[in-house]
Image (spheres, rainbow, N blue to C red):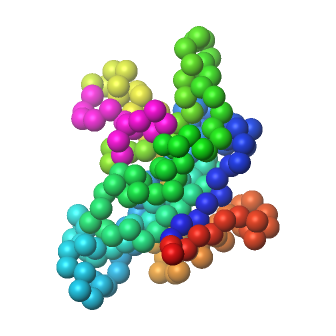
Amino acid sequence: MYWEWIPSCPEEWLCIEKGFARKFPRAIGSIDGKHIVLDCPFNSGSEYYNYKRTYSIVLLALVDSQYNFIFADIGCQGIISDGGVFTNTLLWNKICMNSLNLPPPHPLPGSNIDVPYIFLGDGAFALSEHLMKPYPGQHNIGSEKREFNKRLSSARVVVENTFVPLKVPFFKSVIIIVNNFIIWEVDISKKKFKPDS
């Protein structure tokens, strides 16, 4: 099942980018997965058994710099990595089909090289044209790779902070909707909710 509050035009994406611009220019969202622990489903074998040695489903979320959920997909088996969950979402399909209405690539300040707008992920995700992740491994203090990772992490942490209220034993999908309602104060009936068929 998934929820989406995906911007409908490049101008809306640019409003999101403004929130990230100081920490990581061209970022238009931060993405991560959160394991929701559950009792082992009957006859599921190890499908829901995750690397933390619990049974879970995965909540994959894309959030903006103001802690608003832009996209959330919940229900994938815990054995699947965040990157694997992501590549099986409607969001990934829209990225691949170029149907998100993202702004066209634009040069960074002081450059004339066009740079695409990107989502920020961690090492669990695959690097792609629209998904940036940290350099793997350890890097020397002051090195360009270490500074890059530090900047990416400081902008991406917003998604991890958005998950904090989800640790409270409460119906997770309600928190996602209430979170955006409180922050946006918009008519949520205009947003899209799509249970799996």
The residue at 55%/74% (across/down) is 195
Q: Is residue 68 visible?
A: no
Q: Is residue 42 left or right of residue 133?
A: left
Looking at the magenta stretch, what is its main secondary structure?
Answer: loop
Percent x, y of residue 133: 39, 38
Q: Is residue 115 left or right of residue 141?
A: right
Residues 194 and 161: in front is: 194
Up the image or down, 161 lies above or below 169; here it is above
Span of residues in magenta: 125-139
Percent x, y of residue 35: 37, 67
Quadrant assignment, res 104:
top right
Q: Is residue 125 visible?
A: yes
Q: Is residue 106 magenta?
A: no
Up the image or down, 67 lies above or below 112; here it is below
Up the image or down, 9 lies above or below 161; here it is above
Percent x, y of residue 148: 42, 28
Q: Is residue 114 left or right of residue 76?
A: right
Quadrant assignment, res 147:
top left
Percent x, y of residue 3: 59, 65
Residues 196 and 180: in front is: 196
The residue at 63%/69% (across/down) is 193
Residues 152 and 84: in front is: 84
Q: Is residue 132 magenta?
A: yes
The residue at 31%/57% (across/down) is 81
The residue at 33%/73% (across/down) is 56
